[in-house]
Amino acid sequence: MEIKKIAVLGAGDMGHGIAEVSAMAGYEVWMRDIKQEFVDKGMERIKQSLVKLQEKGKIESAEKVLEKIHPTLDLAEAVKDADLIIEAIPEVFELKTKVFAECDKLAKPECIFASNTSTMKITDLAKATKREDKFIGLHFFNPVVVMRLVEVIKGEKTNDEVVKICVDYVKKIGKVPVVVRKDVPGFIVNRIQAPSGALLMAIIDKGIAKPEEVDAVMRKMGLPMGPFELMDFTGIDIFYHASKYYGRTLSPDYEPPKILEEMIKANKLGKKTGKGWYDWSAGRPQIDLEKATDKISPLDFSIVEINEAVRLVEMGVAEPQDIDTAIKLGLNRPFGPFELASSLEEDQILNRLNELASQFGKKIFEPAETIKAKKLKKLLEKKEEKPSEEFQTIKIEKLGDGITKLILNRPDRLNTISVQLLDELDKAISMLWKDNETRVIIITGAGRAFSAGADLGATITHPFDFVEHNRKGERIFRRLGEIPKPVIAAINGYALGGGFEIAMNCDLRLAKKSAILGLPEVGLGIIPGWSGTQRLAKLVGISRAMQLALTGERITGEEAERWGIVNKAFDDDKFEEEVLKYAKNIVERCAPISMALIKRLINKGGEVPMDVGMEWECTACGVVFATEDMREGFSAFFRKEKPKFKGR
């Protein structure tokens, strides 16, 4: 079945966003709500968003997208002939089932029903209809236009073909689907967060720390909001109802404490009512960072989340790789729970879980069976063995003649470097390392940027995580110099921060004369953390490196050529043609084994005494002397022909 018409029920925060991204992907969308003011507000928010996207060049025409969205109050009009209905109404079970029961009578038999619920079991909602096999969960994240994750939840009776159709739909609207293969309350992202929420409540209930003390700790570690301020911002009632739901469906350990019950009764719901954990009447509360306490450990929240992630794998909800992807994309985190677990000792996780379970008297903190049996490392090894899926943030194009282009492909975000892009770049390097057809690699960016640097939207909650994030980037970028093939950075626009550092780790740099290069980190209160301070000094000396890194100054590709950072700068209109010509010239003239050895000698030579480097050079000479390419090179010279190197 092909999806053409989509009905979105609800024009609020989630509904209007789902309608917008669906229309942007070319679908005809009917957006329905129960009051005209709700529909009008939803349409106005869509218009404002589309205008901004058009101004940024992310869409061609806001008007053309708006033409595909049809606002209505009439449920029958919305769902008539719809191929897919997506419900995005308040999180009230009785309300959702009532609406689905009505839709069941009005929609055509083959129509797929989907709920955007963030916690409720899809199987239970589906029972309100006579099409449980065509009922599925599509859990989007707020704001829908920005967030890339969609959890695709398979109910107990959901048909596999329906799952496939919905996965395809999610990809077509530019999102990343993660299939939840077993229907459990909270699915993946919210379910994994649930124990850390229970830990927060237990800390408050026992008087261990106050909300501001906890938030100060988290803010000091780089989080834009602490957990209690965030709870206020999103609505204490939302957290309360989710906790009540988990308390009914999972464990009484999730039941909210008395203090939360009292806040709900007093209508202290956070920002929307002016008071919650904080007073919002004068605007955003000011958190006193000096109140940060040592009575709590931020690592505890990660450990209980790791524990819940392991339980999901044990239950068959999802694989570790998918869980990490969901957490990183759904929460804007640099690491998933299994990636974090790989940096911790098994006994450290096991012992701390036992301590937390004993301290707070909660079974939900007790170690999962895999952790209890000390088999977590084996689970992590299994995760590493899982084959990677298609790339989402990069593209690989074979240009022929032994040339492969690796494209950083997040043009709507100026190819900023997310954790996912880092992971995919690492996998792409490994893939091209083994690819015998590839002789030369060209790295460039989609759109008008090479890369504008690190994705600042990634949330890092602990200094150790930040250290590991930087080490990871350094290690991956360094592999560009270690891969036994020439790597050319084709700098087609902005190359800032981490983007500039990628380019510096390449063997050769070609740039548009108008390209902009620089290290702006100092203006953000941070430093170049992916080898920038070390690479730049080696390329242009200490004085020039100081100038760029200390001031955050930006230079053009033309200036970078004069400085010696860029090997050649070309006119913008001839850039792609000249880069390809440059790469072809290398393939035609240079022997693969010779290039691989030269790369290693030059890169490693600066790290060892001269005598050692010269000894390596002599050994390398002996290696190339025994190659077929050496004999072909000499023979072609005397034949006065171009050599035909084979890399042997």
Image (tube, helix red, strand yellow):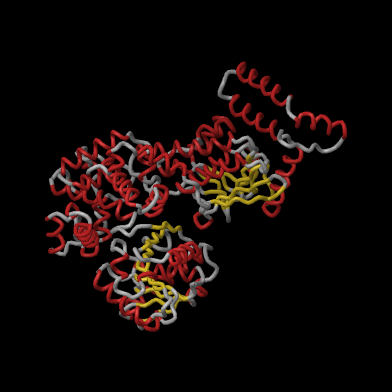
Residue 614, compared with residue 496, is above or below; it is above
Q: Percent position (x, y) of residue 598?
A: 66, 29
* Closer to us: 581 or 288: 581
**Direction from residue 260 to residue 474 in the image, left or right:** right
Residue 138: image quadrant is bottom left
What is the quadrant of residue 83 in the picture? bottom left
Q: Residue at x 69, y 24 (%)?
A: 623
Q: Percent from the top left, x then y, of residue 534?
A: 52, 32
Q: Residue at x 51, y 71 (%)?
A: 26
The residue positioned farthest toward the top in the image shown:
611
Look at 19% across and 39% down and name the residue there: 295
Vertical arrangement, residue 548 with respect to residue 411, above or below? above
Q: Position of residue 615 (x, y in %)?
A: 64, 18
Displayed quadrant of residue 503: top right
Q: How many marks?
A: 0
**Quarter of the picture holding the C terminus:** top right
Compare residues 180 and 39 and report the one nearer the observer: 180
- Residue 319, given in percent of the width and then of the height, sits at 40, 49
* Whether residue 445 can be seen here: yes
Check the image and name the residue furthest to the right. Answer: 639
Q: Nearer the viewer, residue 230 or 114?
A: 114
Instruction: Look at the image and tell me whether residue 554 can be seen.
Output: no
Q: Is residue 525 above or below residue 235?
A: above
